Amino acid sequence: MGRMSARKSKSTRITLQDVARKSGFSPSTVSIVLSEAPLSRYVAAQTKERIRKTAEVLGYRPDVFARSLRSRRSNTIGVLLFDISDPFCVLILRGIEKALHGTRFMPILMDAHHERAQFEGYLDLLMERRVEGLIVVANWLFDEGGLLKASSREPMPSVVVGRDVSEQRIGSVIVDNEAGGYLAIKHLYDLGHRQIALIRGPEKLIDSTRRWNGIERFARENGWKIDPRRVRQLRDAIEPISGFEGGMQLTADLLQSRQKFTALMAFDDLTALGALRALAQAGLSAPRDCSIIGFDDVPLAALSTPGITTIRQPMEEMGAAAARRVLDALHEGRSLGSGLQMLPPELVLRDSTAKLD
Amino acid sequence: MGRMSARKSKSTRITLQDVARKSGFSPSTVSIVLSEAPLSRYVAAQTKERIRKTAEVLGYRPDVFARSLRSRRSNTIGVLLFDISDPFCVLILRGIEKALHGTRFMPILMDAHHERAQFEGYLDLLMERRVEGLIVVANWLFDEGGLLKASSREPMPSVVVGRDVSEQRIGSVIVDNEAGGYLAIKHLYDLGHRQIALIRGPEKLIDSTRRWNGIERFARENGWKIDPRRVRQLRDAIEPISGFEGGMQLTADLLQSRQKFTALMAFDDLTALGALRALAQAGLSAPRDCSIIGFDDVPLAALSTPGITTIRQPMEEMGAAAARRVLDALHEGRSLGSGLQMLPPELVLRDSTAKLD
DNA sequence: TACCTATATTAAAACGATTGAATGAAAGAA
DNA sequence: TTCTTTCATTCAATCGTTTTAATATAGGTA
């Protein structure tokens, strides 16, 4: 109270000790109350209240480092994005965030921009930061070797979104690609199209095969023949953007091949955008001269002209599902539930497809 | 060496103590060597080597929490995104990451998805995590009140990207909007356009005014008259996506007004995409019936058909510049250099603009 | 000799929380 | 009475580093 009081009042953080002194209880009690430890069951109600009030008044904020050091819990979950510039990621992120909000966990984001070295480096960084769980958003091509190694070195609940990692210890959340492929081709077929060009995904991407299986199943079930002369395949490439280039080139190629087609099913939305561009360059337009359907429903799909009809991956739900699985494993101390989780896709109607007349 | 050695070999972390014991030096020396503290100048070369080797062999990883607790440095910089779904952000992020890479700092990302409450909440979280510096990526409309309050409560080097925060303690990195507006209108004028429609940005956004000033300066310098009947203004709205809707509606409105225009300058790329859609709905197309120019050069601009001619904001550089300023302030202990930093925009030619014939 | 400086290393005290074991008090049981 | 049990709180150790001040040795200088 005197001028120049003993404790410097400026720039000195308020600690648990301060709250203890001021409230008249021991640091232990204060800690137990404020962190709602199991023992707090025994603490008298008015004690709790007094401590909470004092903490409030002093503006006490626990030091995360001291806390994590002692309790050996970081209260964080690592989120490793394979490439944030892929619009695919953003909604997944949102889903993760929403699911984590209100829990004691905070996501720590890292973006590897599709570089393997970065990926492993960031993975290491996350381990060093002692994340308690891991979510990998692994769109497009990515090599899972590093992840497996790391996760076995220091076991923790891990889930991969967008990729089927067939590994016991790691969970996966993906869209049902087979159903998606089926849905897409069915839509075109229902509109009356029979001469349909197909751009398959890169060979190494398991999604490609799954979607293709869906297409084949539809063909079988409806007696429709897939004409291999109208089929093209994207090459394996690492950047998500390459889908655009690929879609453009392959569509140009299809147009030149003189195999008539009234509709085109692209591997994903970027490929579809590329196809749109190629059509335009040939003086054609969708859906008048050719219907086009994509896959994913990235934000761009709605903004292009025409808006792209597509198969939506429920990205926000996928992110949330992944987060929930990590949380469950963390709370209940048991390992992740059965490996693979598939969410249903959904047809989104826009303006790039139309009835064949 | 005996079976069942005293220290449990599993799941027990390797600490500084272990390295000390094994190498035969004290924890102090080991710490000094491994963290390259000033005192390491006096440590004998071979001592250093031995310690480093031992650490390597044991696979020692310092505990970040213990380290931060004692040293009072978190080695992190908070990156607060106003809305990550705005494609504007992503490249800025990349710039930040690149600039931080190789320093002792790691970015901690938080995304407020354009909600004020979230913004302040996350800001709090970042403070709690003891970030040493702060970068706010503040595209579109955002309220800086919370930021100012927080930054004065716990002073740290802070830079805002994409917004001119006229405040001593907070730095800003933005594109030179005035020059950008000038460049855009000049491009259309050079192509021969005189009847140019303009969609201004929201009133509350300072960028709008700056770009407008650039347009007016060009008009003055070249004796061109801005016809208010061809001018529209986006309304103040919080979601970045609203630029698309706005662009569409206002363009439709312009078309109906019967004021002929051969070119349209949109406030940003999303607005331009909206305009494109409106033209298409009126049976018109760019650039044949109307040239369109955008602003920002978000990734979508290159992928739409036609590709959108636009004024590029050097986003990656902006991010890097912001990070560098924070780093400088941190290293040299002095406050941030002069408040506002403006980077030059650049005209990117694509297919949505053409010569008037 | 005594004193200083530079080099090389370490002891010990933090940093600010959590937690297992201990202590006290009150109430109920034998 | 004495022993247990339950409730309420605290003691003291601990988490794994960093850092300040101290120690020790050797060489140089006055």
Image: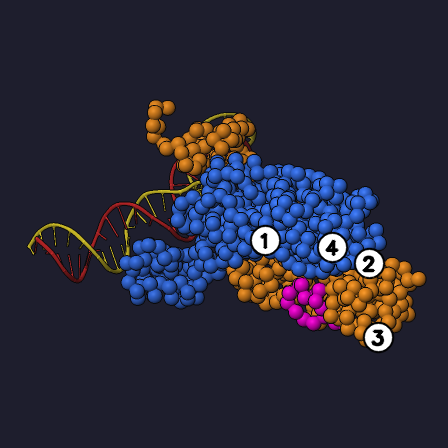
Chain colours: A blue, B orange, C red, D yellow
Amino acid at the residue labelled 4: Ser
Q: Are marks 4 and 3 in contact (CB under 8 Å)?
A: no
Residue at 73 percent across and 70 percent down: it is B249
B24 and A293: which is toward the camera: A293
In the shown orientation, is residue A89 left or right of residue B265? left
Q: Which residue is mark 3?
A: B258
Q: Pick the quarter of the image with the C terminus of chain B.
A: bottom right
Mark 2 falls on what kind of element? loop
| Amino acid residing under circle 3 | Arg
Write down the residue under mark 2: B352
What is the distance, in whole Å, between disc 4 and disc 3 at their CAs?
33 Å
Indicate whether residue A303 is drawn in magenta. Answer: no
Label 4: which residue?
A291
Q: Which one is closest to the eye, mark 3 or mark 2?
A: 3
Side (left or right) of A330 relative to B115: left
Residue occupied by mark 1:
A345
Q: Which residues are magenta?
A: B232-246
- Tell me the quarter of the image containing the N terminus of chain B: top left
Element at badge 4?
A: strand
**Residue extending furthest front?**
A223
Q: Residue furthest right?
A: B357
Across and down, in percent, residue B353 comes to: 84, 59
Q: Secondary structure at mark 3?
A: loop
Element type where label 1 sits in the image: loop
- Residues at marks 1 and 4, CA–CA distance in whole angstroms: 20 Å
